[in-house]
């Protein structure tokens, strides 16, 4: 039995949090014991984790710079539980554990999971962050990583390369385990998609373009709305559904009004029934400008939806252009509108792209593949080694699977 002590910033609804929940719920209880410690609220997933039989601890640290106070509360908890491995998720958790690395816990191996590319200049600009502040955080990240000597696991090649360049981490010390999804979490009742259409006031024969993700400037929703303005002008039965919430929600609603498309745009907010949302839709659109390795397009691919996405590093790892989806230049309104219109008119191509996407996603990003990788990594770290310069899952042939279940379209 290997005891893994997870430290994460919070248990709100984010990609890293969802990966943690998927991991602790589905790994073998006979092999692994998980303890989850989060620095501060929200605790959205806490009940779900406890229901699965795992211990959850909140340190109730301040929301601003929680890592400054973390050693005071974290060290006693670590000493009490004596884990075999400490695993961190997200920036504040990384710092909290690195600053707590002394005394009785200094010999416990630490795994830092890398989920994003926060120090890339384009990301800093798109998110409206202070370059000076980010330069200071990057330097602090670099120095504490060098001192604490954790192991690193990146969620994509793009994230690994960014960590190597921006933090000076040797490539051989960064393994890759791709984000994975439990396909069972996307199941829904047969009537759920139709009921959702009724709830969102979308006609039964309306064509739905769907985008799922946080409403935040780097996600490119303003570009999507402007592209949809062109699409809506020529396709009177087309609708755009945005699932998610975030700081840009109000400004995007205002933009939809300005563009004259608000009657055919639905802001669905944060939802638990993502599977029903995907089955309701005809085409998935993901115009993000920067990512680590996004879950939303993987979920869409698993449900057999044809995907249109930005031609950026992480999405090149997910989508083969013209084979398992269509890639467009990030921020290109006209190109995005053209591809959306083309797929609307070509049912056969949509079905072919969706089928190929599903086959690839289930063969590479299904949770069973990811969980096997994590169990193997924990085993090697616990006995004093780690997977150096390894990619999970390894590239291989795509498994042939049954066609997806979704609404037929004319």
Image (cartoon, grey):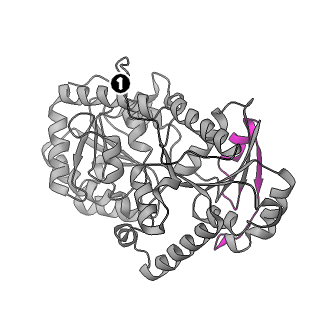
Instruction: Identify which residue is drawn at 38% across, 22% down.
Output: 399
130 vs 5, left or right, is left
Mark 1 residue crowding within 10 angstroms, few (<14) / some (14–19) / many (20+): some
Dividing the image into 4 quarters, which one contains the C terminus? top left
Instruction: Identify which residue is drawn at 41% across, 61% down.
Output: 162
- Where is residue 221 shown, x and y percent of the image? 33, 57
319 vs 103, left or right, is left
Front-most of residues 257 and 117: 117
- Where is residue 43 shown, x and y percent of the image? 68, 53
Residue linked to disc 1: 406
Count the marks: how many?
1
Front-most of residues 73 and 392: 392
Instruction: Identify which residue is drawn at 25% across, 53% down.
Output: 261
- Where is residue 166 shown, x and y percent of the image? 43, 68
The answer to if 331 sits in the magenta stretch is no
Q: Which residues are magenta?
A: 38-66
- Where is residue 363 shown, x and y percent of the image? 42, 28
Instruction: Name the residue furthest right.
Output: 80
Instruction: Name the residue furthest top.
Output: 402
Instruction: Identify which residue is drawn at 70% across, 74% down.
Output: 68
Dividing the image into 4 quarters, which one contains the N terminus? top right
């Amino acid at each position: 039995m290997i005891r893994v002590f997870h430290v994460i910033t919070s248990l709100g609804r984010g990609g890293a949090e969802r990966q943690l929940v998927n991991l602790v719920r589905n790994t073998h209880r006979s092999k692994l014991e998980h303890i989850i410690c989060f620095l501060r609220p929200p605790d959205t997933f806490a009940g779900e984790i406890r229901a699965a039989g795992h211990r959850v601890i909140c340190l109730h640290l301040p929301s601003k710079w929680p890592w400054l106070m973390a050693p005071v509360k974290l060290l006693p908890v670590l000493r009490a539980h004596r884990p075999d491995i400490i695993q961190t998720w997200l920036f504040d958790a990384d710092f909290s554990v690195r600053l707590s690395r002394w005394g009785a816990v200094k010999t416990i191996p630490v795994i830092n999971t890398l989920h994003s590319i926060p120090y890339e200049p384009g990301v800093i600009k798109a998110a409206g962050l202070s370059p000076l502040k980010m330069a200071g955080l990057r330097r602090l990240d670099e120095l504490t990583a060098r001192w604490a000597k954790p192991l690193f696991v990146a969620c994509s090649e793009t994230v690994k390369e960014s960590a190597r360049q921006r933090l000076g981490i040797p490539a051989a010390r960064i393994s890759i385990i791709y984000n994975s999804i439990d396909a069972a979490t996307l199941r829904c009742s047969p009537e759920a998609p139709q009921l959702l259409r009724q709830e969102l006031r979308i006609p039964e024969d309306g064509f739905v373009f769907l985008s799922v993700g946080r409403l935040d400037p780097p996600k490119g929703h303003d570009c999507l709305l402007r592209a949809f303005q062109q699409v809506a002008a020529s396709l009177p039965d087309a609708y755009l559904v945005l699932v998610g919430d975030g700081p840009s929600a109000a400004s995007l609603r205002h933009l939809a009004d300005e563009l004259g498309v608000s009657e055919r745009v639905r802001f669905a907010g944060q939802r638990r029934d993502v599977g029903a949302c995907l089955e309701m839709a005809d085409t998935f659109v993901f115009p993000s400008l920067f990512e680590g390795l996004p879950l939303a397009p993987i979920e869409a691919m698993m449900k057999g939806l044809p995907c249109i996405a930005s031609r950026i590093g992480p999405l090149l790892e997910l989508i083969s252009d013209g084979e398992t989806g269509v890639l467009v230049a990030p921020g290109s309104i006209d190109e995005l509108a053209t591809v959306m219109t083309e797929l609307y008119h070509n049912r056969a191509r949509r079905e072919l792209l969706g089928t190929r996407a599903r086959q690839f996603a289930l063969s590479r990003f299904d949770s069973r593949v990811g969980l096997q990788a994590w169990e193997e990594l924990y085993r090697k770290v616990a006995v004093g080694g780690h997977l150096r310069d390894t990619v999970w899952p390894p590239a291989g042939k795509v498994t042939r699977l049954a066609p997806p279940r979704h609404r037929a379209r004319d």
